[in-house]
Image: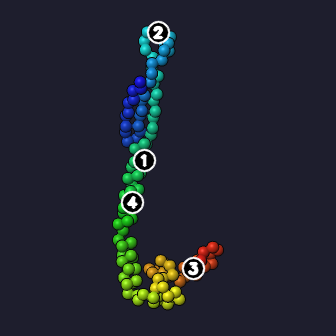
């Protein structure tokens, strides 16, 4: 049977495990019991959980950012104003912009031109 003790802290965790008795292990005093003991020092274990909480808070803050809500609202308003099948100056007659960047950025034609020069990327 193994007995375990834990000492948790901010800077380290200490695990002490008292194992099985060792038979004939103490030559100086044969009638005193001798046990195997394992001690594990684990530094900064609780900081892993703190990092997880910090990443979750950062994700929530990014998801709640007002800039993303405004740009999606602007894109929705712009697509509602554009008549279906009539895209603003685009040869495609589907009514959709050529890329998601074109819906929110006036620099979209320059981006499409740059992307057309990259091998393997079609605009």
Mark toward the start of the polypeptide (1 vs 4): 1
Query: Which quarter of the rendered picture does the N terminus lie within?
Result: top left
Residue tagged by mark 4? Answer: 58
Do the numbered discs 1 and 4 sit on residues whose CB atoms are within 8 Å? no
Cα separation, mark 1 vs mark 2, equals 45 Å
Foreground: disc 2 or disc 3:
3
> Which residue shows up at 39% across the image and 26% down it?
3
Do the numbered discs 1 and 2 sit on residues whose CB atoms are within 8 Å? no
Foreground: disc 1 or disc 3:
3
Residue tagged by mark 3? Answer: 123
Q: Which label is found at residue 48?
A: 1
Residue tagged by mark 2? Answer: 30
Cα separation, mark 2 vs mark 3, equals 84 Å
Observer-nearest of 111 and 79: 79
Q: Position of residue 30 (x, y in %)?
A: 46, 9
> Which residue shows up at 43% across the image and 9% down it?
31
Secondary structure beneath dot 2 equals loop
């Amino acid at each position: 049977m193994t007995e375990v003790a834990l000492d948790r802290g901010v800077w380290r965790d200490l695990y002490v495990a008292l194992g099985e008795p060792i038979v004939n292990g103490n030559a100086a005093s044969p009638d005193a019991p001798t046990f195997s003991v394992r001690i594990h020092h684990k530094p900064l274990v609780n900081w892993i959980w703190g990092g997880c909480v910090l990443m979750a808070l950062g994700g929530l803050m990014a998801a709640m950012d007002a800039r993303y809500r405004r740009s999606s609202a602007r894109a929705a308003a712009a697509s509602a104003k554009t008549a279906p099948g009539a895209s603003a100056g685009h040869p495609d007659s589907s009514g959709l912009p050529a890329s998601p960047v074109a819906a929110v950025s006036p620099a979209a034609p320059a981006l499409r031109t740059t992307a057309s020069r990259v091998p393997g990327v079609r605009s």
